[in-house]
Structures are given as C-alpha cells and as structure tokens.
Image: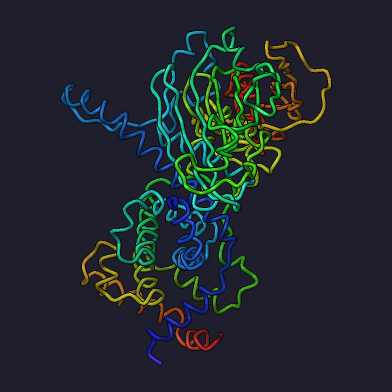
Amino acid sequence: MRKSRADEFMEFAAGRTGHLFRSACLLTSGDTHLAEDLVQETLGRMYALWGRMARIDNPSAYAQTVLVRTYLTQRRRRSSGERPLAELPESTSGRGDDPALRVALLDALARLAPKDRAVVVLRYWEDRSVEETAAAMNVSSAAVRTRSTRALARLREQLGGDLSELAAAV
Amino acid sequence: MPFEDELGKALHNTGGTFHVDQRALVAGGLARGRKKLARRRAALVTGSALTVALVAAGGLYAVRTPERPVADRATEVAKTDAYRHFEVTAEQMEHILENGMERSGIARTSPRVEGSGSTGPATPAKASMTFGDGWGEAIVTVSVRRVDPADPGLRKLLVCPPEKGSPYEECTNQPGDRAVKGYTEAGKAGGVKKWAVTMVSPNGYLIELATQNVQVSGSVSPKGRNPRMSPGKLRHLGMFVDASLTPAGEPNAFGTVEPGAAAEPGDILPILKSLLPERLTVYSEGGTGADGHVVVSDGKGGMTYIEAVRVAGDKDFWSETLPDGTKVGTQRVPAQRPGVVRWRADALRVNGLRMAVSAYNAPTPTSAKRGAEPLITMGELKAIALSRTWLAAR
C-alpha cells in the first residue's frame, strides 16, 4: 500500500501545529498574525523536504529548528525592507483577554533582540541544551551563552518579582 | 526558585494561552509546500537547460523560474494544430486519477496507483487504481489521448453498437459520450463485469474510463457483484480528467495537485488562481465556496480585483454562441467610485453552469481606482470564464 506524501505529512502536521504555533507566538512576542504566517511557512518547508525526512531522527525537533530559522530569516528581511500589509497586525497591548502579567512577559520578550528572543524560546520554552540551541541557530555555543546571559539579565530587570507570580499562576 | 526556572514556567503559562485553527494552518502550510515543490521541480527542468546556456555565456545570473508552466493558462486558446501537442508525466496522470477518485465518494482501501505518461498525441497516457471497495477488489482505469474533436471518425466510438450480438447488457448515448455496462471479453462464465465510458472533450481529448469488479490479475472471485463505480460516477471522473487538461495539451495545476489535501472551502479560488495569466502577481486572495477573488498588482501602484462567481440563471447577457453550445457575453460598466470600471465576462454552458468573471481597476469593488484600466484584458477574462476546469468545481 502506498501512503502518500501528503497523508504522512498531514499526520505529522496535525500533531505538531499547535505547539509550533505557541512557539511562534512567543518568538513574535504575541503577534498572532505573524505567528500564523511563520507556522505556515515552516510547514511548507517541512512538506517540501518531506521526501528526505526518513534521514532525520526527530522531525518534531527539526520542525522547531526550521521555525526558528525561518523567523530569524524573516526578521533579517524585514529590517532591510518592510513589506506593506493590508491590515496592521494587532499589537500585544490589544490583547485585552490576557492577564496583565502575560502581557508584561510578551512585552519584555518584544524588547529583546530577535536572536536573543530565539535563544530564550529554545532554551527555556523548548528546554534545549546550549549545544542544541547553538546547532538550531547556526551559531557557536559561546554565542548562545552570551545571548542567554544578556537576555536573562534584561528580562530580570524588566519583570523582576512579577515573574514568580506569573510562574505560579496556572 | 531560580530565575531560569521561573522564566520557563512563565513561558509555558503564557505560550499555553495561544490557540489557533490548526486545520487552517496545516492547509496553508501544505499549499505553500506544494508551491515550493512545484517551483523546485520547474527549476530542475528549466535549470538544467539554462545552466548550459549560462555557462556558455560565461557568467552566472540569478534566474527567476516561472511559478507554473506556461501551458497552465486559460489564455492559451486552442489552435487547430494544438491537438498535435500532448505532454503529461506518469506522476501527473496518477495525481489526476487519485484526485478524481477522491471526489467520487467511493470508499477506497489500500489504493495502489500506477500511471504512464505521454509525449505525443498518438500515445495514450494512462493511469489505473486498484483498491478494495469494501466488497472486494476493483480496478478503475483512465486512458487519454489527443484527438481533433471535429474528426468524424470519432463518432463510431461514441455510438452504441447494434443490440443484437453486443457484448454489453446496457449501452447509453449522450451528447459527447457513450457509456456501456456488461461483461468483459472473458464472457459471463468469467463473471467479470466491466463498465466503461468513452468521452470526447471539446478541448481535444479522447477520454476512456473503465471499471471492473475484480483486479484483472487477481485471484479474488467477483461473485457476480457489480462494480461500485457506476457509469454516472465514471462520467464524473471523466469530467474531472477533462477539467485537469488544458486546451494546449498539458495538465493544469488544478488536477495534478498532490492528492490527499485537506478539504478546501471550495474550488473556485484555486481554479481562478490556476487560470490567471502568468504575468499577474497575486497580492491577496479570498473567497467562500461559491466565489473566489484575487487582488493582483503590477508592482507600480496599479491594482486589480478579479472575482469569479458561480451564478444561477440565464438572464440575457449573451453576444456569442460557441460550437459546443456555450454562450458568452461581456460587459463594461462603471463601478461605484469615480473612474472605477467593472469588466465582466460570463459563460453559460449547456449543462447550466454559469460563471461570471469580473475585474475592477481597484483593490476592491468599492475602493478608489488604482490604474486607468484593469490589469487583465477582456479577452483574458473571457478565456477564464470559458475554461472547462470550472465544470469540475465543487
């Protein structure tokens, strides 16, 4: 029996899309429109190389890597030439349904440099080691450590005691 | 708790609050992936030819490959000698059959598909699917070759033989096709039933479809049951095959899309996109089941809203009747805002399907004008409205 490429891919995508979207939301510090675009682009890239997926140990982790790389590429492109959008993306402050602390965390993430934010998401949301983070971002382990330390310092400065409150909230 | 741990927990609490329609994202990702693959394949084909040329020229240039093959356009109107061209790959034939069967509503377990392509009008392109239909094994085959629909020799293929001595139990004629039901050459003793439909498309194809209630080489006894694909369903499959091939002799993106896609709200938008002239860049798109629209831009400030709508009714609009009975009409009227015009082309087929394709020289029907005229010509609108691909739209 021949299971089509699309079937296999759909099975995979159905299981991973929710998590990818949540990661993308953190990477874009709550810009859900951009996050949706990122996830679709990531899934598109995964589909295009699905034929070679047999050689990749952990497609889920790989998808996460693709997401982060896609995000960083898009950030690079955006800074060189902003594309006009038909509608303005909602800003995080417009998310009235979110408790203030979550908004504070997303705002604090938004103030980090894109690469620093990627390090934070990979290290503390994805629970990846320094080495794994470095491999996903195509940078050295030392660079990940530097960025990690810097990002944590900035987050601590901005969030301070709020964070323990947010961590406790379920 | 160390700050890192708190951060991890806070991230999880925050990330967990984001929810999204996952199916829409997966469908979007799949569509993008297919585009990427198509581009890569196109680049492989054009790339190999171009590399030679570029190396010979002594330089290396960035090459933009077309997103879709040129023949995939309604603007390519069939010419008499177009019937000499036929080019379809085995994989494309397999996809057309799989996509067509997907719409047949017949349950298929363990389907196996085999296809063969063609590069000349005399060679038929074929595809067959063997599958379990819940009662046993069945096979559906499709064969396509190019013909001149005006060829009088085709008539005998479409007319039922005299009843006496006919191997078929039943045979029906309809304009443009013939369907038979009966036993195969093996005779009643074999118990193998074969139902077949032969069609001639005005686009210049002879399409033959058949189904049997047992795999030809199989050992399963057919037990006298009937094939699940009725001649009506075979006809519908034939229509899908017809809609998947352009008048120019090549398959289009609508039929050859990778099978197994998630259900889309409707086919109008994908078909409209597959029929747009290649020079137009789609800026945004949208649609519900029964209509679809795109906004195209020329990159210099000009924007055009193009919409395709399935319309009910036969209100007089027509200026021309084509040989196959299809009526066509066009209209140029002012729209709401000053300077905005609406160009519209409608086509009404003999089966009652009416498509209306309109273009405005503005990004929406009610916004201010962006450009002196729509970026698409009336001729191109007419070609889109007339495409046979609409016949297969859900």
Where, quadrant-wise, is the N terminus of chain B in this rendering? Answer: bottom left
Residue B311 sits in quarter: top right
Q: Residue furthest front?
A: B189
Relative height, residue B158 to residue B273 (above, below): above
Judge by depth and name the residue closer to the eye, B110 or A40: B110
Judge by depth and name the residue closer to the eye, A11 or A169: A11
Question: Which residue sits at x=70%, y=18%?
Answer: B175
Question: Which residue sits at x=35%, y=32%?
Answer: B64
Residue B233: where, in percent of width, then height? 65, 37
Residue A29: where, in percent of width, then height? 48, 66
Question: Which residue sits at x=69%, y=25%?
Answer: B171
Q: Is residue B22 visible?
A: yes
Would residue A64 be found to the left or right of residue B237 on screen? left
Residue B370 sits in quarter: top right
Residue B341: where, in percent of width, then height? 70, 23
Q: Is residue B301 visible?
A: no
Where, quadrant-wise, is the C terminus of chain B in this rendering? Answer: top right
Judge by depth and name the residue closer to the eye, B159 or B50: B159
Judge by depth and name the residue closer to the eye, B301 or A135: A135
Relative height, residue B390 to residue A113 (above, below): above
Residue B169: where, in percent of width, then height? 68, 29
Relative height, residue B283 to residue A25 (above, below): above
Question: Which residue sits at x=63%, y=44%?
Answer: B224
* Colour style of the rendered protein structure: rainbow
Total number of numbered discs in the rendering: 0
